[in-house]
Image (spheres, rainbow, N blue to C red):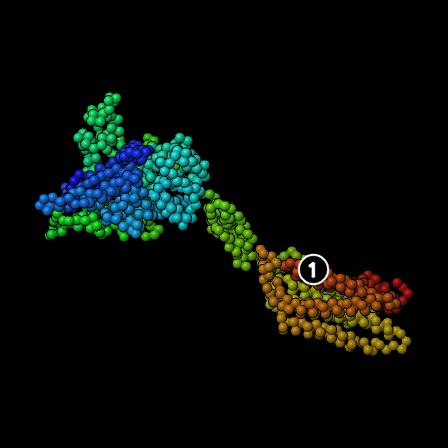
Amino acid sequence: MDGDFTIGGIFSIHNYVHTVNNNYTTMPEPVRCSGSMESRELRFSRAMIFAIEQINNSTDLLPGIKLGYQIYDSCASVLVAVHVAFQFLNSLDPVFYIGNNCSQSGMVMAVVGESGSTPSISLSRVISSFKVPQVSHFATCACLSDKQQYPNFFRTIPSDKFQAGALAKMVKHFGWTWIGAVRSDSDYGNNGMASFLEAAQKEGICVEYSVSFYRTHPHSRIQRVADVIRRSTAMVIVAFAAIGDMAILLEELSRNPSPPRQWIGSEAWVTSPELMRYSFCAGAIGFGIQKSLIPGLRDFLLNLSPSQVAASALLTEFWEDAFNCTLKKSAAATKNNVCDGKEDILNLQSPYTDTSQLRITNMVYKAVYAIAHAIHNAVCQRKNVTSQCDKLTRLESKQVLNQLKTVHFSQNGNDMSFNDNGDPVAIYELVNWQKSKSGDVKMVSVGLYDASLPVGQEFRINRNITWMEGTTKVPVSVCSASCPPGTRKMLQKGKPICCYDCIPCPEGEISNTTDSSDCLPCHKEFWPNAKRDTCIPKPVEFLSFQDILGIILATFSVLGACLAIITGAVFFYHRTSPIVRANNSELSFLLLISLTLCFLCSLTFIGAPSDWSCMLRHTAFGITFVLCISCVLGKTIVVLMAFKATLPGSNVMKWFGPPQQRMTVVSFTFIQVLICTIWLVLSPPFPIKNLTTYKEKIILECDLGSPVGFWAVLGYIGLLASFCFVLAVLARKLPDNFNEAKFITFSMLIFCAVWITFIPAYVSSPGKFTVVVEIFAILASSFGLIMCIFAPKCFIILFKPEKNTKKNLMNKNQS
């Protein structure tokens, strides 16, 4: 239709181009479309005509100016789209009439279209050089937002950049980390899927496979894509495909249905009623443009007179396909099914007549109004309340291009404007394919996505979603099940990061979150619980009075001390008896006192170590044992001196009388006191928490402070014991009926054996058993001394009193 200013339109009313094999010897045939007609695309073109007629009848927008249009079918082909682009440009030359009046009826001020991204790219590259603006209603490729390459491109539908991000967030929202990806092998599919995969990777989503196809590919290629879907383990499939491509894939899948899959669709196909006949896709969800109401459009679409249909080849084709008849004008000789004029378009079920889901149709409507507002702003001036427009104004397409950048209007309650990239605000409806009670699949709006809202608030669901197979439970699509707390993820070799094995945390480490990638070590004083999902304080271990072992050792210590006291009491009661007097009663009583202290000092090793107990236990042990060995050594020397004194002319006993004996004991003990004092002053023992012997528990023990001091104390005791043992061995065969040196020899033999075996046992014993070994050595050596030295005497005193006589003791011939 001619007008004062013309708007171009281009739609993919057919999906294929008739293929011709040129021989290059004759003029090639004109390009012709083939295949079935897309009724929805025909509705888009009719919506453009409706909008233009509405504007022409408006008194507010472009009053007094008539818009014309040139609408072409691109056949969804780049070749045809480029051909149409030159058709638009060829009409730019002005035609002059008499009277110097200039008509611009043939000039295209702007173009609405194309439906596909790839033809839109080709179209934009041609007409952008001539500053002709292009406003697409359905080309969503994010690449078209690049103003360096496509400076003339605008669109009323959001870019796939927003849709891809929204799809990735939705997949993450429902916990799907293992998906399949299917796309059209076109600019729309490839760029859209690339944006989605980039967003999905940021969300931690893994892709099992990513395959592409196109409707013109061989059937074997489509079969391979279908087989990949059938064999896959991913339950969720994200399809970024054009409606024509998706129809071919679903048709192939319907021949041999795959296991149930949850389909996630892009806007291009998920809002198409034509594809809902594939019932195995019920439960599909995806984002669609918000549906809206265009008053008067349905009546316009249905108001087709026979003359209108006959005058348009496209309407004729639509009419004949819809009613399966042939108009007389184009009837073939062999056909007898002629349209009789009784066809009822009001009851026709077709995408052309379906205005219940006006989504992309509204984008066409907005595109026409955006161009009209741009022309209005260029040729009209506002005076008072009304606008006055001059249709004779010389208008160039670049003026319309500049005005489109700033256009802002509201139509049917919807605001419309373009950002710097020529894109509108991204608002999507979340749509769900739900089966009705009758078994038909219906499209239901279940949520909304608004990219203009703050991060985290863009996505919301306002009603229940029906998933695949009609369930209301969200399907699970993961490569590996979540790893529970107490385990960590270990990636499977050669697979994406979503495929992993769950392995328990190693010793000393925990994980307290699901799907933890690493286990965290516990603090050195804590240890994991059995599930290894939390750290608990390590149990503190030491030899306590509540332990069975501690009770046993404490009991033996007290019994030993009591035995020493009882022995002392017996000796004191029989202190005037020959056997007591003959064995140096003063040293015997001192020895019994030191043995009592030896038994009792072992009690300092039991209980929780403290600063005082650590210093006391080692020094008390060292000093009391030296006192004990000094007494034994004194008794041994007395035995030797006594037999030396019996020799003629010997006065040795006057040099080793009681004062000298006391001095010997004090001197030997003083040296040990001096060693202990130096040890305590320079580096005393102190309590520590041993965290290395056992990983799972803390050992409270005493650190030696200075190992040199400890081994000096032990070495000094060993030196005295060895010296005493040598002297006792030398005196063991001296003639006497009751030679005490024999018993001292046995006691020293036991003492040395115990403490020699103590050293390796002490070094190798772990934890509290180090203390047990030390107490055992103290008790064993103490019991050895008291039993070997005092038990025979007590036996004679208590049970053989007839032998407790001076005569019996002096008889050297008796055994």
Residue 357, quarter of the rendered image: top left
Q: Is residue 708 visible?
A: yes
Q: Which residue is mark 1?
A: 761
For the C terminus, give its image quadrant: bottom right
Nearest to the observer: residue 285 or residue 522? 285
Residue at 88% in and 73% down: 646
**Where residue 61 appears, x then y in whole percent?**
16, 46
Instruction: Classify residue 545 as left or right of residue 412.
Output: right
Residue at 22% in and 37% down: 46
Instruction: Classify residue 285 as left or right of residue 528.
Output: left
Nearest to the observer: residue 154 or residue 178? 154
- Say how many tags the image has: 1
Vertical side of 480 occupied by 732: above or below: below
Q: Residues within 10 Å of mark 1 (few under 14, many from 20)?
A: some
For the N terminus, give its image quadrant: top left
Residue at 34% in and 43% down: 187
**Where residue 16 appears, x then y in whole percent?**
31, 35
Nearest to the observer: residue 373 or residue 133? 133
Disc 1 is placed on an element classified as helix
Residue 707, quarter of the rendered image: bottom right
- Give the residue furthest to the front: 25
**Where residue 259 appears, x then y in whole percent?**
43, 34
Vertical side of 163 occupied by 261: above or below: above
Residue at 29% in and 51% down: 147
Instruction: Classify residue 250 as left or right of residue 764.
Output: left
